[in-house]
Image: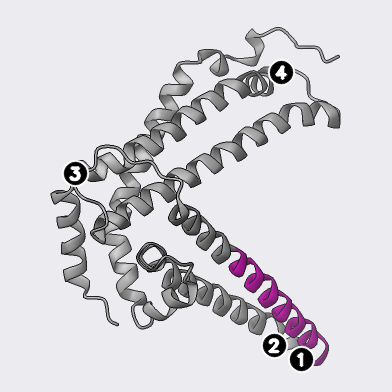
Amino acid sequence: MKIQFERTIAAAYRFVLENFVSVLGIGWFPFLLAGLIGVALFSAVLPQMDLMLRSGQEKWSQDQVAQLIAPIAGAGFVFAIAIILAAAMVLVGMMRMALGQHPAPVYIFFSLGGQVWRMIGAYILLLLLLWAATIAIAIGIGVVSFVLSKSAPAVQLPVTALLTCIAVLWGIYAVVRVQFFLPAVVVGENHIGLRRSWNLGRGNFWRIVGIVIVIVLPIGVVHSILTNVLLQTSLAAHPMTMMNPDEVRCISWQ
């Protein structure tokens, strides 16, 4: 199946414009919840972050470092889970609406149903397969490089570099080809269909890249701007994190 490049782009923008209220309705609540969780977590770890920024001590023990880093890392992990859940919800909601499974308009959307968990599971499985393939390829390239170092040292470096470049390019190709159709397969066919997505992406790599650039990239730019604005606003609300360390008394550890 070949993607109709121009028709797909036109249909995507027409879909967003014609269903703009529903698009906002699907997206605002999950990300609002994730944002509130992020604010709560940020407030909870603010003392640790403030201490790291302001402390005048240069030598900390491992226990002291763990006391600072552990809460921040834990908060980051919880926030990452919240963002993943919100993104999966929104993706499922958008796909349902695109496939005609959602009556419009949609003013609020929240779901923890099977499709959301299958969506998360599909991307986790894709990530695990990518890691496994990366490890296997790295081992293979390492073996080839070792053999060449013993038998043909002159070509070891260029061959290793060439194999590494090929592996990286193939990995990009595989991920792009699989992930593009994955949401549609998960929602439309109600199963984690990595093989199905791979088959649908055959012969469409450059079309997919073009569609991502034309459609997804502008959305990513807007999202990045909004995220930076919210981050700066959050930091401005806690000016003590921006104070000069010299203005703060030395904090002693017990």
| Residue 102, x across and y down, in percent | 25, 52
Q: Position of residue 77 (x, y in %)?
A: 61, 40
Distance from Cα at disc 2 to Cα at disc 3: 63 Å
Residue that protrudes farthest toward the bottom in the picture: 151
What quarter of the picture does the C terminus occupy? Answer: top right
- Contact between marks 3 and 1 (CB within 8 A): the answer is no
The region drawn magenta spans 128-152
Q: Residue at x 30, y 43 (%)?
A: 26
Main SS of residues in magenta? helix
Report the amino acid beneath label 1. Ala
Tell me the number on the disc at residue 155: 2
Q: In which quadrant of the rendered view does residue 70 lie? A: top right
Please state which amino acid type lies under the numbered disc 4. Ser
In this view, 245 is above or below 225 = above
- What residue sits 58% from the left and 77% below the top? 167
Left or right: where 58 falls relative to 179: right
Cβ atoms at labels 4 and 1 below 8 Å apart: no
